[in-house]
Image (cartoon, rainbow, N blue to C red):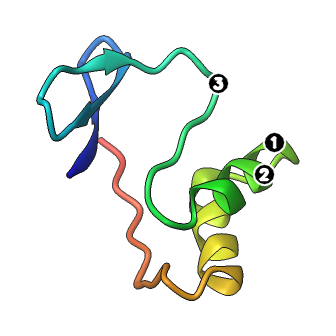
Amino acid sequence: FTALIIGLDKKCWRVEDKLAPFEVLEPFHAIGSGRDFAISAMAFGKTAYQAVEFAIKYDTSTGGPVMFMCP
């Protein structure tokens, strides 16, 4: 189990199976099997949405569909 939680204060927290959240301090972050592909794409200027699409293309365990949710 891994989840990212974005608070109303725009801080990002990562929660894993121990349920002890820790704040993500990097400028971008990803979880799942395609995380390395997604982080690389964001490091080269892609949006989070584009980074997930990139991960889907190159990681056989990452799949879609990709949904964009913005408050």
Outermost residue on the front side: it is 18
Q: Which amino acid does label 3 sit on?
A: Pro
Q: Could you say which disc has been placed on residue 43 in the image?
A: 1
Q: Quadrant of residue 67?
A: bottom left
Residue 12 percent coordinates (x, y): 38, 24
Q: Residues within 10 Å of mark 1 (few under 14, many from 20)?
A: few
Question: Could you tell me which residue is drawn at 57 percent across and 56 percent down?
Answer: 35
Which tag, 1 or 3, sits closer to the chain's start? 3
Classify residue 2 as left or right of residue 61.
Answer: left
- The answer to whether residue 45 is left or right of residue 18 is right
In the rendered view, tell whether residue 63 sits above or below residue 25: below
Mark 3 lies on a secondary structure that is loop
Residue, disc 3: 27
Q: Which residue corresponds to mark 2?
A: 40
Q: Are marks 1 and 2 in contact (CB under 8 Å)?
A: yes
Which corner quadrant of the image does residue 58 belong to? bottom right
**Element under label 2?**
helix
Q: Looking at the rendering, in which quadrant would you find the C terminus?
A: top left
Task: Tell me the distance, in whole angstroms, between the alpha carbons under discs 1 and 2.
Answer: 5 Å
Q: Residues within 10 Å of mark 2 (few under 14, many from 20)?
A: some
